[in-house]
Image (cartoon, rainbow, N blue to C red):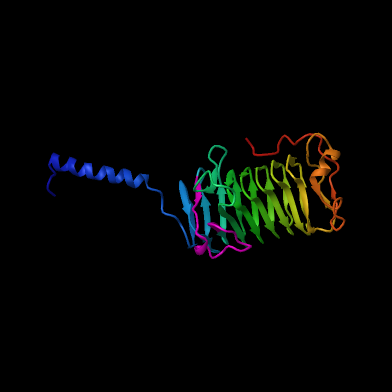
């Protein structure tokens, strides 16, 4: 192979370097369509449209990964009606393991960080045998996590500026040690048997919204703070009483709490929430583990 002259070498180098720099700076192409098999996401991953994680897929997301949802024209959005949501979304029918760390959380957000809540659809988990989210953050979604007939764990995660942070239907779900604030609704569910404990739920329009027939639930040792107009709301499908003992609602006690509760005290069609005993102090273990 002939040797390059120094002049030719540097000429080629000057051509190559700008191309390499430009390639490194360009955003990654967006994923779309249906995904199968063993998958690993790391760095920055862009999603466009209704991305389906098929039943045979196992997705692992590395600590520090940024999942960016891109805008989707309504004409191209074929899954907009409930149980789906407008905008790009990740539909999980396989398994997803998103384990960040305290120092390297995994983030799920819209491409424009200044965009409002509802700018992307959500993570729509349907029939999944395993969905784990640990040290993740969720911003700007319609419904950041929506689970149906699935087994889900959500812990040590931040939900802010979403229309709904977590919603579920008939799911085996554990929601523990999270911070949910500045959302339209923090947690909304009907049916299902959730374990919801040691979360800080503050400054949402609705802290907890139960829409229908709760069964086998445990909701305890949470701190509900300044969710207005309602700390807790019962929907018209909840005619039975609901037990929410051993949660912290602020230092003022029952008299200060009741104006921020929508239950049978306001509408005799609904069940009544049993709050007592109230926690007199917040659980020091509640919220994201630092």
Residue beneath the point at 73% across and 53% down:
194
**Would you place residue 137 above or below residue 126 in this image?**
above
Q: Nearer the viewer, residue 2 or 83?
A: 83
The secondary structure making up most of the magenta span is: loop
**Would you place residue 139 above or below residue 77 in this image?**
above
Left or right: 192 in relation to 101: right
The percent coordinates of residue 278 (x first, y second) are 83, 40
Q: Which residues are magenta?
A: 65-90
Left or right: 227 in relation to 27: right
Q: Nearer the viewer, residue 226 or 285?
A: 226
**Would you place residue 32 above or below residue 61 in this image?**
below
Residue beneath the point at 76% across and 41% down:
221
Q: Is residue 174 magenta?
A: no
The percent coordinates of residue 254 (x first, y second) are 85, 40
Residue beneath the point at 12% across and 48% down:
2
Residue beneath the point at 28% across and 43% down:
18
Quadrant (top left, top right, bottom left, bottom right) of the C terminus: top right
Q: Nearer the viewer, residue 31 or 80?
A: 80
Left or right: 118 in relation to 251: left
Q: Nearer the viewer, residue 46 or 5?
A: 46
The percent coordinates of residue 50 (x first, y second) are 52, 61
The outermost residue toward the bottom is: 78
> Tag count in the figure?
0
The percent coordinates of residue 80 (x first, y second) are 58, 62
Q: Is residue 67 magenta?
A: yes
Residue 86 figure quarter = bottom right
């Amino acid at each position: 192979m002939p040797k390059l002259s120094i002049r030719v070498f540097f000429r080629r180098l000057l051509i190559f370097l700008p191309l390499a720099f430009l390639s490194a700076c360009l955003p990654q192409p967006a994923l779309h369509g249906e995904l199968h098999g063993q998958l690993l996401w790391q760095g920055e991953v862009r999603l466009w449209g209704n991305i389906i994680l098929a039943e045979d897929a196992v997705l692992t997301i590395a600590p520090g990964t940024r999942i960016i949802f891109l805008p989707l024209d309504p004409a191209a959005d074929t899954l907009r009606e409930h149980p789906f949501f407008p905008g790009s979304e990740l539909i999980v029918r396989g398994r997803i393991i998103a384990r960040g760390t305290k120092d390297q959380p995994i983030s799920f957000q819209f491409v424009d960080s200044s965009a409002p809540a509802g700018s992307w659809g959500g993570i729509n988990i349907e029939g999944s045998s395993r969905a784990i989210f640990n040290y993740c953050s969720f911003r700007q979604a319609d419904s950041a996590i929506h689970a149906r007939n699935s087994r889900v764990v959500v812990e040590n995660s931040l939900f802010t500026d979403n229309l709904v942070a977590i919603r579920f239907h008939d799911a085996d779900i554990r929601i523990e040690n999270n911070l949910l604030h500045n959302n339209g609704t923090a947690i909304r569910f009907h049916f299902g048997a959730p374990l919801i404990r040691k979360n800080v739920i503050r400054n949402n329009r609705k802290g907890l919204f139960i829409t229908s027939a709760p069964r086998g639930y445990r909701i305890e040792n949470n701190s509900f703070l300044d969710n207005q107009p309602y700390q807790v709301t019962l929907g018209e499908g909840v005619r039975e009483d609901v037990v929410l003992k051993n949660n912290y609602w602020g230092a003022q006690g029952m008299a200060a709490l009741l104006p921020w509760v929508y239950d049978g005290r306001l509408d005799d069609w609904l069940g009544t929430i049993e709050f007592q005993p109230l926690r007199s102090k917040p659980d020091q273990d509640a919220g994201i583990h630092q």
